[in-house]
Amino acid sequence: MTTTQSAQEYYRVLLTTVVGQAYHAAGYTLEDNPIQWAGGMYRYSKRLDSGLYTYILYQHLAYPEPNPSRFRVSLVRTDIPNPNAVSRHDAYIRKTLSELVVKDFGVAILPSADHWWQYRTTQELGHALAEAGHLVVGYGIPWLAGELLPD
């Protein structure tokens, strides 16, 4: 990270480098919202053919050394073009990626259903983003589309 680059800008660059191409291939676009980015919120969105909106939300908390920084991923499907609004629509869903993978699908690849990916170095961040991105592509995106359901 350069001295003129904030922790949030640096995170966004790595986020788009690691997962951006895969998400773009699945039809998701990183919403251009520098104000949200400055607060550590990054939103990939896609509108389904059914008219519903789907979101992959990254919440990033940057901490000064020696503390680890962290992030988590949430998934939302809604009829409202705002992932923060609660909907009464039958297809509305919202959960963290870790809850979906560990609790709903029963895959014990993460330590808990309330997992935050932590990192201290650029290498650790890249690894954490890749791990989360693989889980989003393997579980989150098909789940949001209604193509993959837990048993």
Image: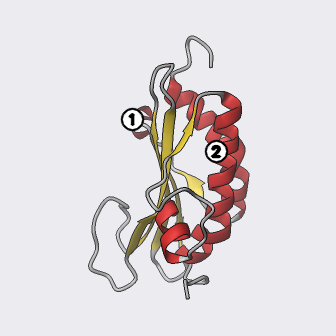
Find residue 140 and report its horizontal and vertical position in percent.
57, 68
53 to 65, vertically: above or below: below
Secondary element under disc 2, as helix, strand or loop, is helix
Quadrant (top left/top right/bottom left/bottom right) for the N terminus: top right
Q: Nearer the viewer, residue 134 or 49?
A: 134
Find residue 7 and report its horizontal and vertical position in percent.
52, 25
Find residue 64 and report its horizontal and vertical position in percent.
46, 20
Q: Mark 2 and mark 1: span between their CA atoms? A: 20 Å
* Residue at 61% over, 75% down: 142
Q: Quadrant of residue 125?
A: top right
Disc 2 marks a residue whose amino acid type is: Ala
Question: Which residue extends farthest bottom?
Answer: 151
Left or right, 60 with reference to 90:
right
Residue beneath disc 2: 128
25 to 31, vertically: above or below: below
Which sits earlier in the primary sequence, circle 2 or circle 1? 1
Residue beneath disc 1: 39
